[in-house]
C-alpha cells in the first residue's frame, strides 16, 4: 500500500479523534467537578449541586470545605475546579482567577437563647472580642464571664469579621475557643449560655439567637440595602475562564434555576 495513502488515513483518524475529544469536553453528559473552600458556602454549594444533578446525572460533582483560604489556593494550583470563598479576595489572591459572585451573606452575632442581651454596638462587639469587655453585665446581661467562640485561620468568615469589626490593629483575645466551621460555632453557642460567636446568616436557625448590631437586625432586607453592615460575598472562583462541564454548571448557577436556589438559601442580592 502506498505510504502516502497510509499517512493520509492516519491523519484523518487523528483529526476525527481530536474533533470527538473537543466535542465531548464541552458537554455536560459526563465528567467530574471538584468544589473546595469556604465552610459557609459549602452547604449552599451542596444544595446547588443536588438540584443541578437532577437534570445533569452524568456529571459528578464533589463538594468539600476547608475554608476560604484552602479554596483560593486549591483553584490556583489546579487541585480544584471551583474554589469557594466567603470573603473579598486580596489583590494577590485574585491573580489568574475569575470571580462569580453568588450574592451577599450576613455575619450574624449569635448568643445562647437564654441570654437576655438583644443588641450590641460595633464598638462593644470589638471590645468583647478583644477582651476589653469580659462580663455580660457590662453590656446589660447577667453577671457572667463572656466565652468567646471564633473561627480558624483561613476562614473567610473570620477574615470578614476582623476586617469589619476588629480592624487591622486589634486582635481577637488569645483564649477564644476556635472552631472549624459555622455549624461548629453555632453548636458551641447553643450549648453555652455565656458564649458568643459569629456565624453565616445563611446557616442561622432557632438553635441560637441573633443579636442586632447598632440597632439593625440581620435580615434579607437589611443585608440587601446595606444597613446591616456585617456582611460579605459568597464567591465561586475559577482559574482563567470556565470551560466544559464547569462552565455549564456555573452558567446554570448564575441563571434562573440557580438564582432560585440561592434565594431559598438566604443568599442576598444587593439592592443599592
Image: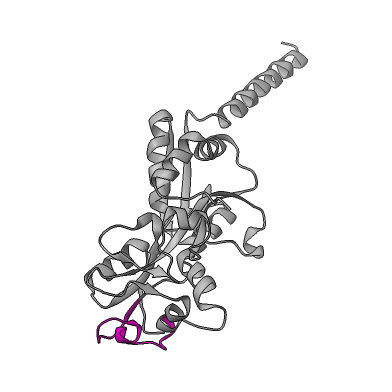
Query: How is colour applied across the structure in the image?
Result: one colour
Q: Is residue 55 visible?
A: yes
Question: Where does the image place residue 127, in percent across and percent down from the top left?
Answer: 44, 84
Q: Residue at x 37, y 73 (%)?
A: 119
Query: Per the image, is 81 magenta?
Result: no
Residue 80 seen in render: no
Task: Say if 168 sits above or below 46 in the image.
Answer: below
Q: Is residue 26 above or below residue 198?
A: above
- The answer to whether residue 142 is magenta is yes
User: Which residue is rendered at x = 57% and y = 38% of the image?
Assistant: 247
Name the one closer to the observer, 142 or 97. 142
Examine the rendered structure and indicate whether residue 127 appears above or below residue 78: below
Q: Quadrant of the N terminus?
A: top right
The majority secondary structure of the magenta stretch comes to loop
Q: Position of residue 69 (x, y in %)?
A: 51, 63
The picture quadrant where one finds residue 146 is: bottom left
Horizontal relation, residue 31 to residue 239: left or right: left
Q: 87 or 245: nearer the eye? A: 87
Q: Nearer the viewer, residue 124 or 21?
A: 124
Residue at x-position 50% and y-position 78%: 166
Q: What percent of the width, then of the height, locates residue 25?
A: 57, 32
| 49 to 198, vertically: above or below | above
In the rendered view, does 232 fall on the left or right side of 201?
right
Which of 76 and 42 lies nearest the eye of the viewer? Answer: 42
Instruction: Residue 165 in the image: state x and y as whole percent.
Output: 50, 74
Q: Residue at x 50, y 30 (%)?
A: 28
Q: Residue at the top extreme?
A: 1
Residue at the far front: name it: 215
Range of residues picked out in magenta? 129-148
Amino acid at each position: 500500500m502506498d505510504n502516502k495513502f497510509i499517512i493520509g488515513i492516519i491523519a484523518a483518524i487523528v483529526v476525527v479523534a481530536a474533533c470527538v475529544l473537543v466535542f465531548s469536553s464541552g458537554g455536560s453528559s459526563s465528567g467530574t467537578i471538584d468544589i473546595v473552600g469556604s465552610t459557609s458556602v459549602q452547604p449552599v454549594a451542596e444544595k446547588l449541586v443536588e438540584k443541578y444533578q437532577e437534570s445533569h446525572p452524568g456529571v459528578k460533582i464533589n463538594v468539600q470545605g476547608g475554608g476560604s483560604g484552602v479554596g483560593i489556593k486549591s483553584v490556583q494550583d489546579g487541585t480544584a475546579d471551583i474554589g469557594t470563598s466567603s470573603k473579598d479576595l486580596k489583590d494577590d489572591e485574585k491573580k489568574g482567577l475569575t470571580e462569580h459572585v453568588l450574592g451577599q451573606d450576613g455575619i450574624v452575632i449569635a448568643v445562647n437563647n437564654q441570654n437576655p442581651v438583644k443588641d450590641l454596638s460595633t464598638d462593644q462587639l470589638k471590645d468583647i472580642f478583644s477582651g476589653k469587655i469580659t462580663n455580660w453585665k457590662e453590656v446589660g446581661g447577667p453577671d457572667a464571664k463572656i466565652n468567646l467562640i471564633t473561627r480558624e485561620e483561613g476562614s473567610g468568615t473570620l477574615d470578614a469579621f476582623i476586617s469589619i469589626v476588629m480592624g487591622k490593629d486589634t486582635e481577637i483575645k488569645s483564649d477564644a475557643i476556635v472552631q472549624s466551621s459555622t455549624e461548629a460555632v453555632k453548636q458551641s453557642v447553643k450549648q453555652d449560655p455565656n458564649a458568643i460567636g459569629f456565624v453565616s446568616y445563611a446557616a442561622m436557625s432557632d438553635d441560637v439567637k441573633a443579636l442586632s448590631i447598632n440597632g439593625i437586625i440581620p435580615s434579607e432586607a437589611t443585608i440587601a440595602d446595606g444597613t446591616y453592615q456585617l456582611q460579605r460575598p459568597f464567591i465561586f472562583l475559577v482559574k482563567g475562564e470556565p470551560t466544559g462541564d464547569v462552565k455549564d454548571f456555573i452558567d446554570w448557577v448564575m441563571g434562573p434555576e440557580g438564582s432560585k436556589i440561592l434565594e431559598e438559601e438566604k443568599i442576598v442580592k444587593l439592592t443599592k
